[in-house]
């Protein structure tokens, strides 16, 4: 899939995201389109080629420490609130892949987002023992990855209802 350039507010290139991600950023008002495809559309939007952040993102802060600080909320953000076991976008809990009671580490590499039913079902077992294979391997995200996950969460599914953000 084509990638959309994301510019900082001062028009320096930050990184690239998918069209879906870029449209969500526009929909949420964190970015505005700079350049769009003349004919291609994504819901009510013209497909962007370049978007620019509305607010300037301090790059020194984003890049000064490449590893993001580990937290439960961070794990949910990294995984887009998708359950690592069933794949549904209903994850509200964090699961230690190798349970802490079995010597599992506390950190990004041993934590995934999980929905409550899967977390309960897995219990004090490893994915192998529970026959619940992981859909992806946990990884240590960078601050930039978490920052953009926060700007455009993958469970914001209402891109086609332009301007109508669900009540929070
Ligand atoms: Zn689940």
Image: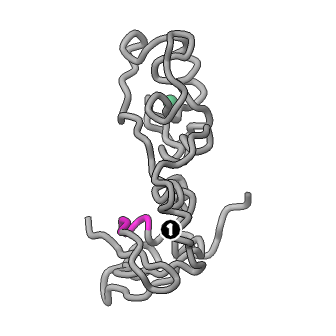
Q: Which residue is pictured at 48% across the width and 48% down the height?
A: 67
Q: Considering depth in this image, is 10 or 95 the residue closer to the camera?
A: 10
Q: Which residue is mark 1?
A: 24
Say which element carries label 1: helix
User: Would you place residue 110 above or below residue 59 in this image?
Assistant: above
Task: Answer yes or no: is residue 38 visible.
Answer: yes
Taking the magenta stretch, the answer to whether it contains residue 19 is yes
- The picture places residue 121, in percent across and down from the top left corner, at 53, 16
User: Would you place residue 167 above or below residue 131 in this image?
Assistant: below
Taking the magenta stretch, the answer to whether it contains residue 106 is no
Q: Which residue is pictured at 43% across the width and 12% down the height?
A: 130
Task: Answer yes or no: is residue 153 visible.
Answer: no
The outermost residue toward the left is 1
Q: Which residue is pictured at 67% across the width and 62% down the height?
A: 166
Q: Which residue is pictured at 56% across the width and 11% down the height?
A: 101
Q: Considering depth in this image, is 63 or 113 the residue closer to the camera?
A: 63
User: Would you place residue 86 above or below residue 131 in this image?
Assistant: below
Q: Around disc 1, counting alpha carbons within 10 Å, would you say few (fewer than 14), some (14 to 19), or many (20 or more)?
A: many
- The picture places residue 7, in percent across and down from the top left corner, at 43, 79
Residue range (magenta): 16-21
Q: Is residue 145 left or right of residue 128?
A: right
Q: How many numbered marks does the figure carry?
A: 1
- The picture places residue 88, in percent across and down from the top left corner, at 48, 38
Q: Specify the quadrant of the image occupied by residue 128.
A: top left
Q: Specify the quadrant of the image occupied by residue 13.
A: bottom left
């Amino acid at each position: 899939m084509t990638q959309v350039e994301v510019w900082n507010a001062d028009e320096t290139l930050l990184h690239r995201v998918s069209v879906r991600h870029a449209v969500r950023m526009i929909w949420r008002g964190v970015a505005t389109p700079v350049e769009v495809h003349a004919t291609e559309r994504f819901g009510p939007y013209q497909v962007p080629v370049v978007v620019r952040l509305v607010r300037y993102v301090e790059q020194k802060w984003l890049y000064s420490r490449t590893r993001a600080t580990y937290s439960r909320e961070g794990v949910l953000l990294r995984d887009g609130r998708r359950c690592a076991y069933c794949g549904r976008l209903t994850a509200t809990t964090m699961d230690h892949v190798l349970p802490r009671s079995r010597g599992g580490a506390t950190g990004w590499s041993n934590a995934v987002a999980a929905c409550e039913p899967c977390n309960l079902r897995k219990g004090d077992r490893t994915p192998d023992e529970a026959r619940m294979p992981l859909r992806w391997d946990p990884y240590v995200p960078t601050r930039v990855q978490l920052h953009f996950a926060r700007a455009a969460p993958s469970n914001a599914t209402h891109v086609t209802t332009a301007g109508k953000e669900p009540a929070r």
